[in-house]
């Protein structure tokens, strides 16, 4: 069967009466992960991927045929016969979009063979020189049921296994590559999650193993306003001719500046499956980080202790109480546990003290966790009855507990680590000995380092190397937020116990100054003060190198914030 015949097959599960249905809304498109591509990006990718007038081209998520129209234009440009009518191929799950795609390709001077189907049920044939497109982006929370099962099966056909946290694009990318001839080219718009999320590790490894050449194009600005997500262009050449020994990283401002794209920077990952965030950084800086680690001056946070998630209440509004609210309810002190309030805006200093906790409570923050005695007091019983009456007990996390109103506890941590950050993750000493919710992480220090870590690690962590590495191991979310999960925190670079011990006296001396700077919101000045103690005392670390470290961190943070600003 030819590729043309293959894609002309009508899927028996499709209702073709709906082909003329014009109803399609942004909400419906978002549900199926369809975000239509700017024409500049479609032209750039098809120009790179299509090199001969006889190239066979497929768009596996055709949508309104942005890529197929661009492909027809490119094929006609390459054809010696100005009157040529190129054939292009595609798959599209949405009936009306498939209908529109065929019409647009005809109007562009080509013929489209588009199969209306779920792409994951289409058996791959290695028939194409170029596969181009913008895979559907559906987050794992909404990527469920049979569709997820088919996607995982498709990924397994490509030789990789994806976790339950994988979004739709991951399996889509692997499945798409299986349609390429040997030496074929894959040109995709992908979420920038490709570079940083853990679930994409098998995809990153797949790309390096299967392709001879891998290129990435990054944008300074957000180019998909509707999707509210950062993207990267993947240019993978030489299918089944891998493995690639490096990648080329190129950067541009936005879609309109793609035509003036520079040659880029070569980057060789130590492990292709690991995060690719380091591809954005000068290789000399990466080498410097490795050297400091090998010298025993920097280590990962896991050396100091274990980072864990906080408590999940199921309903913070009900289970967390301010002192005033607890008093109104008549609850006893033994029915309330001390708590770091929901959120993390109060954890921007070096320590959460008892005095600070009292101040937060006086200001109306919820510094208590409702945890009734057994049996509950009359006041607690009345509050429990009120929770039942208002349906608090029907929330999933409450419903699955043996006793719905008793939140599973985690012990007070030595340190509290903010996980959602506009600037950088912060480590705060838990001097008040409070428990914490899942809006922050807890760090439980090893016995060997507990005293030193509680006293000085929150201070010592405010250095340029640790801030830079946070940008590398964390992940950027909407609004420019940098998120760090416990597994990512485990490998986050920290000054080693040896370095902090040797600098302890100087750190104690600078601690009041740093605390005052943080209280005034002057983070970078605080970091510079810590750098004077830790970095300038490191052998073989010059002032120039320190400035480059700071610049590298600033560039990553600015890139994250610029994309957030351009998306507003």
Image (cartoon, helix red, strand yellow):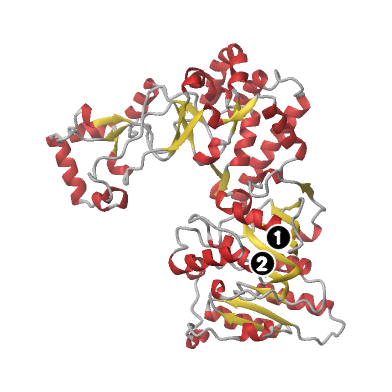
- Mark 2 in CB contact with mark 1 (< 8 angstroms): yes
Q: Residue furthest right?
A: 80
210 shown above or below 269: below
Q: Residues within 10 Å of mark 2 (few under 14, many from 20)?
A: many
Determine which quarter of the picture holds residue 79: bottom right
Quarter that holds the N terminus: bottom right
Q: Is residue 381 visible?
A: yes
Residue 226: image quadrant is bottom right
Q: Disc 2 designates what residue?
A: 177
How far is mark 2 from mark 1, CA to CA? 9 Å
Residue 420 in view, yes or no: no
Residue 70 left/right relative to 83: left
In percent of the image, x 48 and y 58: which residue is there? 140
Residue 220 in the figure: left or right of residue 53: left
Q: Mark 2: which secondary structure? A: helix
Q: Quadrant of residue 88?
A: bottom right
Q: How many marks?
A: 2
The residue that appears at 57% across and 45% down in the rendered structure is 475
Name the residue beneath numbered marker 1.
210
**In the image, residue 513 above or below residue 14:** above
């Amino acid at each position: 069967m030819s590729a043309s015949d293959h894609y002309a097959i009508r899927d028996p599960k499709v209702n073709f009466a709906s082909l003329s249905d014009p109803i399609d809304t942004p909400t419906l498109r978002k549900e199926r992960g369809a975000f239509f591509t700017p024409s500049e990006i479609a032209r750039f990718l098809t120009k790179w991927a299509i090199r001969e007038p006889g190239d066979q081209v497929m768009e596996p998520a055709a949508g309104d045929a942005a890529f197929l129209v661009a492909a027809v234009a490119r094929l006609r440009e390459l054809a010696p016969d100005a009157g040529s009518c190129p054939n292009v191929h595609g798959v599209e799950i949405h009936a009306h979009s498939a209908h529109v795609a065929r019409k647009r390709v005809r109007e562009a001077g080509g013929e489209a063979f588009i199969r209306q189907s779920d792409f994951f049920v289409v058996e791959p044939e290695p028939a194409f020189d170029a596969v181009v497109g913008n895979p559907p982006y559906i987050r794992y929370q909404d990527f469920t049921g049979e569709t997820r099962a088919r996607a995982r099966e498709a990924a397994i056909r490509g030789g990789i296994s994806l976790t339950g946290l994988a979004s739709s694009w991951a399996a889509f990318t692997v499945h798409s590559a299986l349609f390429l001839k040997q030496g074929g080219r894959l040109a995709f718009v992908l979420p920038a999650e490709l570079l940083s999320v853990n679930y994409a590790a098998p995809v990153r490894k797949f790309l390096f193993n299967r392709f001879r050449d891998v290129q990435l194009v990054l944008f300074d600005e957000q180019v998909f306003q509707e999707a509210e997500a950062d993207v990267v262009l993947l240019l993978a050449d030489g299918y089944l001719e891998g493995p690639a020994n490096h990648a080329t990283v190129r950067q541009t401002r936005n879609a309109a500046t793609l035509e003036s794209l520079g040659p880029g920077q070569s980057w060789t990952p130590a492990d292709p499956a690991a995060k690719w965030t380091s591809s954005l950084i000068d290789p000399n800086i990466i080498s410097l980080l490795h050297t400091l680690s090998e010298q025993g001056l920097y280590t990962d946070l896991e050396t100091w202790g274990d980072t864990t998630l906080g408590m999940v209440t199921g309903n913070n509004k009900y289970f967390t109480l301010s002192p005033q609210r607890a008093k109104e309810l008549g609850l006893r002190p033994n029915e309330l546990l001390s708590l770091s309030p929901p959120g993390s805006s109060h954890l921007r200093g070096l320590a959460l003290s008892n005095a600070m906790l009292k101040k937060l409570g006086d200001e109306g923050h919820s510094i208590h966790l409702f945890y009734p005695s057994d049996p509950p007091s009359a006041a607690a019983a009345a509050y429990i009855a009120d929770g039942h009456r208002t349906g608090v007990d029907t929330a999933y996390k409450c419903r699955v507990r043996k006793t719905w109103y008793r939140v599973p506890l985690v012990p007070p941590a030595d340190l509290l680590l903010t996980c959602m950050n506009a600037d950088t993750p912060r480590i705060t000493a838990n001097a008040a000995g409070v428990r914490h919710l899942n809006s922050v992480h807890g760090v439980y220090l090893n016995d060997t380092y507990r005293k030193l870590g509680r006293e000085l690690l929150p201070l010592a962590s405010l250095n340029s190397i640790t801030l830079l590495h946070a940008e590398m191991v964390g992940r950027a979310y909407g609004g420019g937020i940098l998120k760090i999960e416990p597994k990512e925190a485990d490998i986050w670079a920290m000054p080693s116990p040896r370095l902090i011990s040797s600098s302890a006296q100087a750190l104690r001396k600078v601690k009041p100054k740093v605390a005052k700077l943080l209280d005034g919101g002057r983070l970078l000045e605080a970091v510079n003060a810590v750098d004077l103690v830790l970095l300038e005392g490191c052998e073989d670390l010059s002032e120039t190198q320190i400035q480059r470290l700071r610049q590298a961190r600033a560039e990553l943070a600015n890139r994250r914030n610029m994309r957030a600003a351009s998306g507003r």
